[in-house]
Image (cartoon, rainbow, N blue to C red):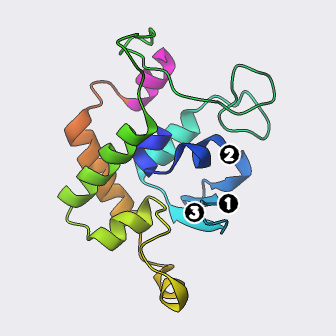
Amino acid sequence: MALLFTGFRMSNIRALRWSDIDFDEGMLTLERMKNGLRRTFPLSDQALEAFRLTPRTHDVIVFEGRHYNKPITGLRQIDIDGNEVDKGGGLRAHDTWELFSSPAAKAGLSGPVINWMRGDVTIMQGAASRYMHDLGSHADANAIANQIVAKCGPALPLAEMLKRA
């Protein structure tokens, strides 16, 4: 859900710490993006709910993996009941990136806004990139999330889906 509702790279989701999420302001800070810079993003209401419902199995790491005190290493494909599915491959991070980008376009957001919202660091270079810091908003994040929900479900409330997983 975090990948789907944010459009971030798997490496950024794996590195998330609880201190990176500001639940009061609805913001998430990525400490180190692909270009090495730190960026803060607005979260949709659905993304905030997903993070609120994520069990806190670790004091620092948001998504603790199977090895104690280490972040997750990958994704596995599960069905609606939380059972693992093996159909020749799991859910890829690229799949969630695409599932974020397409609804963003359907929500009427421009290419630069979509790229900015998902953390793409190649949309602007040099001095121009400094003026892009307020490109995305909570309204944009919610517009994308509403399109994702309309396209993909969920068939169940988010809390019920996360409980099953």
Residue at 67 percent of width and 65 percent of height: 36
In the depicted structure, whether residue 10 falls above or below residue 125: above
Residue at 49 percent of width and 87 percent of height: 131
Image quadrant containing the N terminus:
top left
How far apart are the two marked residues, 1 and 3, measured between alpha carbons?
A: 20 Å
Circle 3 residue: 25
Secondary structure state at the residue bearing disc 3: loop
Circle 1 residue: 32
The magenta stretch is 158-165
Of labels 2 and 1, earlier in sequence is: 2
Percent position (x, y) of residue 117?
A: 42, 63
Residue 98's tag is none
| Residue 16 colored in magenta in the image | no
Circle 2 residue: 15
Residues marked 2 and 1 touching at CB (< 8 Å): yes
Percent position (x, y) of residue 77?
A: 43, 20
Which residue is situated farthest in the bottom direction here?
127
